Image: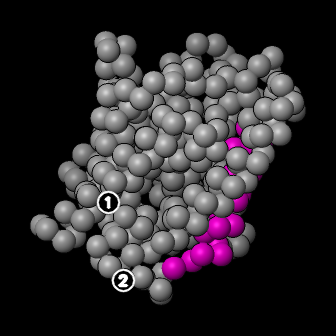
Amino acid sequence: MLAVLSVLFSGLIFGIGLSLAGMLDPTKVTSFLNILGKWDPSLGFVMLGGIIVTTFGYFFIFKRGKPLFEKDFDLPKKQKIDKSLIIGSALFGIGWGLAGLCPGPVIASLAFDPFGMFLFLLVMVIGLKFGNVINKLL
Amino acid sequence: MSINWTDFTPMLSSLGGILIGFAALILMLAKGRIMGMSGILSGLLIPNSSTEFLWRSVFVAGVIAGPAILINFDLINIASTPVASGLLLYVAAFCVGIGTAIGRGCTSGHGICGLSRLSARSLCAVLTFVISGIITVSILRHVL
């Protein structure tokens, strides 16, 4: 129960953070990527704020040795920088630049634009499924 | 290049980022998991056990409830102006989906959690998607 509540709380804080940060506004997101035009550096501050807190926090959490409600940390095992990492991230960047939306904000935006975002989410999920199939083949 | 001072929100964006960081810490401390939205969604589509399904759906519910609470209690005005429509919007959606699946992460997983774990893979991913995003926006706004 406490585990589920913690996860809910984490999701809530993430959703609120994305909202305050301006990440739910595709115009603001693309203004950050528009370095050749009128550049809005705000999203750099989102990343910086997030990374500072998380780097320090992770250090102490990992030092604990294990999470509160699981036997072990479940961290990505891959270390190698491979072609799929670069190709996948490049494709993601194209979609991010085209629509100004990445997965977190898509989910959070369901709060105020359920219909429009649901269609976007649906196509995004089809893409995710497709990608997972490709991952199995590689 | 010039700075868009009118839309620049350093305080709010930093605060939002700090909250996103705390969210990532809570998930790691409680469940030992990376807070990556694309990964959490992916796992929701292929649940291997009911507990996996439960925490992922609860997290997603929380992410929707966060802004819903802000809007309901009129705490902040969430601006959201679309930049794409029609076919382009869905091409973008597909690219985001397939790209984060193949690249194994998005802005939250690689950008916040991965960089904070000092992962070289995540650094590569972030540099790649930011540069690719910049190129995409530059072509849309300054070439076409």
Q: Which residue appears at 19% of the width and 63% of the height?
A: B139
Gap between marks 1 and 2 measured at Cα: 15 Å
Q: Residue at x 47, y 87 (%)?
A: B6
* Quadrant in which the N terminus of chain B is drawn: bottom left
Whether residue B108 appears in this view of the structure is no
Secondary structure of residue under mark 2: strand
Residue highlighted by disc 2: B2
Q: Residues within 10 Å of mark 2 (few under 14, many from 20)?
A: few
Q: Which region shows up in magenta?
A: B8-27
In the displayed structure, B68 sits above or below B41; it is below
Q: Residues within 10 Å of mark 1 (few under 14, many from 20)?
A: many
Identify the residue under disc 1: B134
Residue under disc 1 on the same chain as residue under disc 2: yes
Give how far across and how far down residue B24 sits, in percent.
69, 44
| Chain letter, disc 2 residue | B
Amino acid at pointer 2 = Ser
Q: Position of residue B67 (x, y in %)?
A: 63, 59
